[in-house]
Amino acid sequence: MVSVVPFIGRRRELAALTKRLDRVRRSGAGSAMAIRGRRQVGKSRLVQEFCDKAETPYLFFTATKGMSPVEAVEAFCAELKESCLPADPEQVVRVTSGSWPEAFRVLHSAIPPTPSIVVVDEMPWLAEQDDLFDGALQTAWDRLLAAKPVLLLLLGSDLHMMERLTAYDRPFYGRADTMALDPLDPAETAGALGLTGGDGIDAYLASGGLPGILRAWPHGTPPLEFIRQECEDPASPLFGVPESVLLAEFPAPDQARRVLEAVGSGDRTHATVAATAGGREGPLQSGSLSPLLRRLTDEKHVLAMDEPLSVQPGKPALYRIRDHNLRMYLGVLRAAAEHSHRGRPDLAFGLVRRRWASLRGRAVEPIVRQALGMAAAAGELPWPDTEAVGGWWNRRFSPEVDLVGADRAPVARRVLFAGSIKWLGTPFDGHDLAALRRDAVQVPGFDAEAGGLAVVSLSGVHPSVEGVGLVWGADDVLAAWG
């Protein structure tokens, strides 16, 4: 029987929201916060949980994409009237002009003299339909709302527009704190599902830590068994959630979508992405591809770029899908979903099972590097001067060193350790150690005499392996988030 996953994690985020509401209570003045995060990451659920626990009157308004200003303002006033915010709902005036300044005056009159919360969800959709919305919000905040004991929470899934909301050249600059809401981390994901070790990390790789998928995951079910079950359901959130993200952010099959899908299919370098995302006329030209990669990395935050870490500048940069569920979806789950839609769950799961080991072996690398980076920041590594953890490769990708620890990035002064990630069903053994020693000396700045070696292995280390300064397993990786 599938059990509904209760609200999990988010202790830091709830504490941050509570802190700001307490500030409102003490000062009697307003406070604003802009919360951004990808779709399905749990922004609305977090804020609803906060409102429920705050025991404070609140308004929770969710915008609708494509709704005209007239419709949006009418919906806002209707939601305000139905909320627990106004003392007398009949006094809430219906605004039919589509004027946000007028709507904000109605809101001002409905806010009680005691602390309250106002939530505007998917705010970028309002600004998308009304160029004057940002200015109207700033004017209303400065002249009316900031003097009230209200906590204003502005939520949005369009990361670039939400970042722009509080940028220095925008009307609301300096008026709101910001919170970037990421998916649940690996430890929260594993804990929510009652999984440990490699199963916990695999669950994070499959779900991306997205609550919409975790809610459908039976407690204690191993990842591959869950995927097998979901292959029998074409409407599974395992397939539907990432597809909805793609359709929302990349509705048209344009060049940006082709570049994203090229990276998702396994192309990592500028040249291979250009070849795959091109057409009959040949690879995408650098003049087109480079701005697209920058937009997908810096604005949309859907791609991440990794650079080789050593004492020398290195190339090439490698691109990957930032969200783990979307990465697995583009890598194999979308193809599995097509089999599932045709009534062939056996073919769907067979495809996943064949590709799973290689996909997760590559996908786990940034998770391990991040875990080691957090352990380094906490002073828990044998090399106390470590401040950056990455990988190293040359233009031929021969060799590729999974782990490099250094005193800074992207160009280090000192390389402190090199390491290997083995995410397979066999232990790290003497052959693996010999390969690590051979490859590590090619990392510019690594000293075989002074530098250390690190091993992160899913299946442990063979007793014959000696001379390694750090050995981690899957539980150690999860513990970094503990």
Image (cartoon, rainbow, N blue to C red):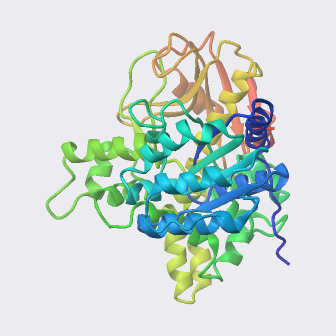
Comparing 274 with 58, the one in front is 58
Measured as percent of width and height from the top left, residue 77 is found at 58, 64
Where does the image place residue 353, in percent across and percent down from the top left?
62, 68
Q: Is residue 181 above or below residue 8?
A: above
The number of numbered discs placed on residues in the rendered structure image is: 0
- Tell me where residue 91 sits by quadrant: bottom right
**Which of 427 and 414 lies nearest the eye of the viewer?**
414
Q: Quadrant of the C terminus?
A: top right
Residue at the image position 39 percent from the left and 62 percent from the top: 250
Residue 400 drawn above or below residue 258: above
- Tell whether 6 sits left or right of 137: right
Q: Relative to residue 261, is residue 385 depicted above or below?
A: above
Locate residue 65 relative to residue 395 in the image: left or right. Answer: right
Residue 154 percent coordinates (x, y): 58, 48
Residue 273 located left or right of residue 301: left
The residue lying at 54 percent from left, 11 percent from top is 414
Determine the residue positioned at 53% across, 36% down: 142
Which residue occupies the foreground of this view, 22 or 391? 22
In the image shown, does 93 or 82 lie closer to the viewer? 93
Residue 179 visible at all: no
